Image (cartoon, grey):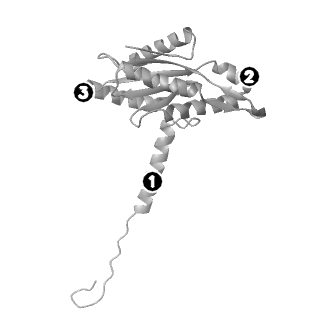
């Protein structure tokens, strides 16, 4: 640039784009850390709670139905006691990956705690919720873990599910799905029971 006298002038513009980009990247990594289960790399309980509250809000304002599935690995303590916690961790990762792979992009999977997993299934009815739960159960049942010496460890899961109701809070929906999960375990395990 030149001024009115023809003398060249230089203008320098500094922007902290690289610093802002780095900060945004670090914040995203922190968010992932806070909302992800470090072992299974799927959402954690906090991630589930945030998504469940959002689904509940959509249900109350826009009447978008959704269901909740809860799964528990059958005889998980026996897996840990027999094969060790390393194999138990592999089992948790395998189940988490199988659940994630069986879902639509709008469905949400999370590790609820221990060997329990939850799945939010929006835009569904009770029949479809059962179909999703049964698909996941069958996929886990037909998967395995290769052990040293060439043997395989097969895992099964039990599941329970419930559809959202008008007066639900997240806690009441979880309670009903957990009751169905308990029924699945009491009636022989490796099954899914879904109800209202």
Percent coordinates x, y for residue 144 in the rendering: 64, 30
Residue located beneath label 1 in the image:
23
Residue lying at 68% horizontally and 23% vertically, measured from the top left: 79
**Structural distance between the alpha carbons of marks 2 and 3:** 49 Å
**104 is higher (above) or lower (below) than 157:** below
Query: Is 167 on the left-hand or right-hand side of 154?
Result: left
List the residue tagged with mark 2.
82
How many circles with numbers are drawn on the protein? 3
Q: Is residue 89 visible?
A: no
Foreground tag (3 vs 1): 3
Is residue 97 placed above or below 66 in the rendered structure? below
> Which residue in the structure is indicated by mark 3?
61
Image coordinates for residue 75, horizontal then vertical, percent: 64, 18
- Dot 3: element: helix
Quadrant of the frame with the C terminus: top left
Q: Earlier in the sequence, mark 3 or mark 1?
A: 1
116 to 106, vertically: above or below: above
* Element type where label 1 sits in the image: helix
Q: Residues within 10 Å of mark 2 (few under 14, many from 20)?
A: few
């Amino acid at each position: 640039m030149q001024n009115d006298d023809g003398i060249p002038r230089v203008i320098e513009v500094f922007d902290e784009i690289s610093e802002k980009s780095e900060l945004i990247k670090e914040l995203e990594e922190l968010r992932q850390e806070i909302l992800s289960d470090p072992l299974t790399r799927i959402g954690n309980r906090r991630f589930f709670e945030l998504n469940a509250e959002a689904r509940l809000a959509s249900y109350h304002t826009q009447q978008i139905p959704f269901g909740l599935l809860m799964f528990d690995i059958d005889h998980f303590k026996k897996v840990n006691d027999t094969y060790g916690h390393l194999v138990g961790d592999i089992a948790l990762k395998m189940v988490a990956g199988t659940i994630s792979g069986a879902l639509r992009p709008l469905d949400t999977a999370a590790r609820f705690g221990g060997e329990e997993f939850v799945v939010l299934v929006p835009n569904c009815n009770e029949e479809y919720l059962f179909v999703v739960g049964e698909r996941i159960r069958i996929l886990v049942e037909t998967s395995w873990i290769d052990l040293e010496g060439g043997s395989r460890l097969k895992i099964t899961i039990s599941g329970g599910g419930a559809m959202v109701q008008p007066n639900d809070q997240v806690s009441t929906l979880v309670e009903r799905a957990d009751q169905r999960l308990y029924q699945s375990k009491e009636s022989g395990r490796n099954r899914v029971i879904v109800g209202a």
